[in-house]
Amino acid sequence: MAPSGSRNIKRDCRRVLYWIPVLFICLIVAWSYYAYVVQLCIGKGEHAAVWVNLECGRRRQRLATVMWLDMGRTGIKRLVYLLAYHVFFIMFVWAYWQTIFTKPMNPLKEFHLSHSDKELLEREDRGESQQEILRRIAKDLPIYTRTTSGAIRYCERCHLVKPDRCHHCSVCDKCILKMDHHCPWVNNCVGFSNYKFFTLFLAYSLLYCLFITATDLQYFIKFWTNGLPDTQAKFHIMFLFFASSMFSVSLASLFAYHCWLVCKNRSTLEVFRAPAFRHGTDKNGFSLGVSKNLRQVFGDEKKYWLLPVFSSDGETHPFPAKPLRDSQSRLLNNGQTWTDNEGTEDKERQGV
């Protein structure tokens, strides 16, 4: 019992530690909200009002009137800033929430080995005999890919035949459909169920940082030219500009990379190791063209593309809807065909 209890404690500690990056992001976002809304927009307005009142006591009434009018225009500008800021903020937080709390999809039951098949597989010592068993199990499954050595992709921890684009996550200890990577900043696996949310999270976080950088720039310049009152807001404005600009650079590169992945219909794992088919590896084996690749992630209805709601195209299996060449055809020749193109080709070959 002691070793089991120790393992449970270690597992619980790891689960707590995994939330530290998410907590860090939440604290940064909360501080940015305070700095921009309270210190920059609301706080700056109060300081300007005090300054105008002081000037009224020292200069002519005409100058005071001009300054009050200018303050009115500034107030309208800050109101527009606040409205636009909250749009970006809400969309960013919404997409981030969806990315974190959307559970990754796991393979269907049909890919799991039955109890008898697991016992039969465990009794076999030779690799070739195990592969024969796996071929028999996989012959009716929509599987097109193999390992680089040509074997059936099998997960020994989950006891299942891996669907195409499915990989085992060592952190989640599960097989994840269309796994892209495990992201510590969301404490979740990015895969089929939440890849759209992750992409929108990158997009809206980038827009959020760019908007803050652009609107904070004028006050950042005043900071260095001593045009700001010497208050607490002065330092919030300075650090807000530095933080948003630095995050913008890193987010821009990451967002551009994942846009390229979406257009190519690849995952991060497939970039480092191309999927293997019967004819060999093919880095573009799942690409259907840019338009269809986009719809596979964001769905057919464009009105939902910019919203963090699930609208991804297709079912969980199979992913390779691409018309397959002879060398990239069904994993097992005697299996049921899964695309219209394959059925047509089979009929033509039978006629010949």
Image (cartoon, rainbow, N blue to C red):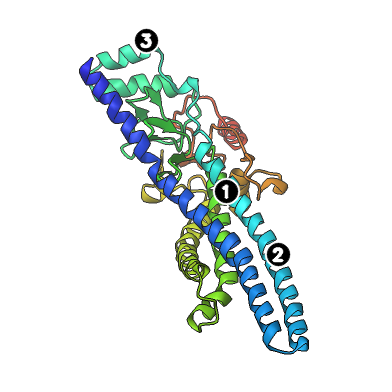
Going by the numbered disc 2, the residue's amino acid type is: Leu
Answer with left or right where residue 293 lies relative to residue 175. Answer: right
Q: Secondary structure at mark 1?
A: helix
Please name the residue shown 56% across and 32% down the image.
346
Going by the numbered disc 1, the residue's amino acid type is: Val
Outermost residue, front side: 57
Q: Quadrant of residue 8?
A: top left
Q: Secondary structure at mark 2?
A: helix
**Distance from the alpha carbon under mark 2 to that under mark 3:** 68 Å
Question: To which residue does mark 2 refer?
Answer: 79
Q: Is residue 90 above or below residue 249?
A: above
Question: To which residue does mark 1 refer?
Answer: 93
Q: Secondary structure at mark 3?
A: helix
Please name the residue shown 33% across and 40% down the image.
148
Question: To which residue does mark 3 refer?
Answer: 116
Question: Is there any visible trace of residue 185 in the rendered image?
Answer: no
Between tags 1 and 2, which lies in front?
A: 2
**Distance from the alpha carbon under mark 1 to that under mark 3:** 47 Å
Q: Nearer the viewer, residue 195 or 12?
A: 12
Q: Look at the image and tell me in which quarter the C terminus lies.
A: top right
Going by the numbered disc 3, the residue's amino acid type is: Ser
Q: Position of residue 176 (x, y in %)?
A: 44, 34
